Image (tube, rainbow, N blue to C red):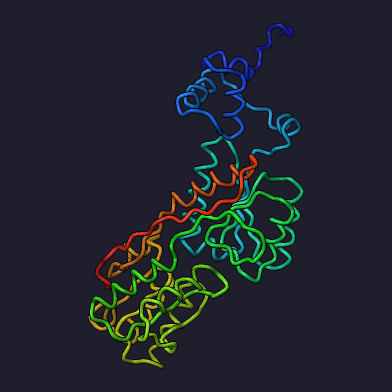
Amino acid sequence: MTPSDVPKKPTIRDVAAAAGVSYGTVSRVLNGGHWVSPEARAAVDAAIVSTGYTTNQAARSLATGKTGSLAFLLTESQHVLLSDPNMALLLRGATDAVSERGMTLVLLIADTEREQANAARYVRAGHVDGVLLVSSHESDDLLGSLVNAGVPTVCSGIPLWEGRTVAHVAIDEVGSARTMTRHLMDGGHRRIALITGPLDTPSGRFRLDGFRDELGDRFDGDLVEVVPFTREAGAEAMTRLLERAPDVDAVFAASDLLAVGAAQTLAAQGRRIPQDVALAGFDDSGLAAAHTPPLTTIRQPWAQISATMVEMVLDAIAGGDPDAVVLPTTLVVRESA
C-alpha cells in the first residue's frame, strides 16, 4: 500500500462541510457547545458520526490549553461512595452530562488531609479543566486551595467558606426541612426528634436550622442527634433518642440512609412504623421507596443538580462569573409518616 492509498483522516473542515456550518461552529461544539444553537449542534453531531471524525486530544490540549476533562471530587471516604446512593446518583448524572459534551469525567476521592493535598496538586497541575466539588466540609482547606489557585470550581450545596464567592448548586435546605417538620406536626405528632448530619456540612447544618425554625417554642435540643450520614449512625442515634425520650412519636432523619438505620432500631425495640413512631427521611434516592414501610421523604432533583453543576463549571472555564442556583424539592408522602 502506498501513502496515497491510506484513507485521509477526516478534519474539522470536513465535518463543517457535511454539517453545512462554519469551521468556528464545529470548533465551539467540540469545546463544550457554548453559543451554539441546538439545531447547529445536532447537525455537527450527525456530521461527526457520518464522517468518522475523532479529535486528537494531545494536539487539542496543546493548542487550547484544555484537557477536555472535569474532576468529580468527593471529599469523603471510598466507603461513602459505595454505600450512600446519593453520591452514586450525582456521579451518574455528572457522567451523563459530561459525556454528552464529548468530555471525560475523572473521579477523585479525597477524605484525609493528605489525600486532599494530593488532589489539589493534581488539579492545579492542569490535568482537568474544572472541578465538581461534592460533600465539602467547613473545616477542609481544599475549597480555598482550589479557588485561590483560580481553578474553575462548582460546589454541590452551599459552601461553608468565608472566602470569595464560590459557584454552587443547592436546594432550599432550610425550607425543605421546614416542610417536612410541618408535615409531621400537621399529623398530630408532639414529640418530634431530628437525626441530622455533621454541622460542618450544609445539609447537616441547614436541615437542623429548618427543623428548629418550624418547631419554634416546641424545639427541644434533647430530641436532636448529630451524626455522620451513615446507616449505622442512624441506628445508634435512634437508640440514644429512645433512651432519653421514650415518648418520642415522630422522627425526621436528614437522609434516607439515616432513616433506614433508625428504622432498624425501632423494629428491634418493638416500635411499629408509623403506628407507634412516624418516620421521615430526606433525599428520595431509591432507598425510601424500597423500604418497608415506604418512607415519606423530601425528593431532591438529582439529575438536574448534576447537569446544572456541569453547565456552571463549563461557564466558569469560559470566563463566566461565579453563580448560585437553588433548585426546588418535593415532599413525597408515603406510608411511614
Asked whether 209 or 31 is in front, the reply is 209
Task: Say which quarter of the image contains residue 21.
Answer: top right
Asked whether 234 or 123 is in front, the reply is 123
What residue lies at 55% left-to-right and 36% top-to-bottom? 101
- Residue 110 lies, in percent from the top left, at 66, 62
Task: Say which quarter of the image contains residue 114.
Answer: bottom right
What residue lies at 34% left-to-right and 69% top-to-bottom? 179
What residue lies at 63% left-to-right and 20% top-to-bottom? 12
- The quarter of the rendered structure image containing the N terminus is top right
- In the figure, 140 relative to 221: above or below? above
Task: Say which quarter of the image contains residue 181.
Answer: bottom left
What residue lies at 46% left-to-right and 29% top-to-bottom? 38
Q: Give left or right: position of 191 versus 77.
A: left
- In the figure, 41 relative to 171: above or below? above
- Residue 265 lies, in percent from the top left, at 38, 82
- Residue 6 lies, in percent from the top left, at 68, 11
All told, the count of numbered labels is 0
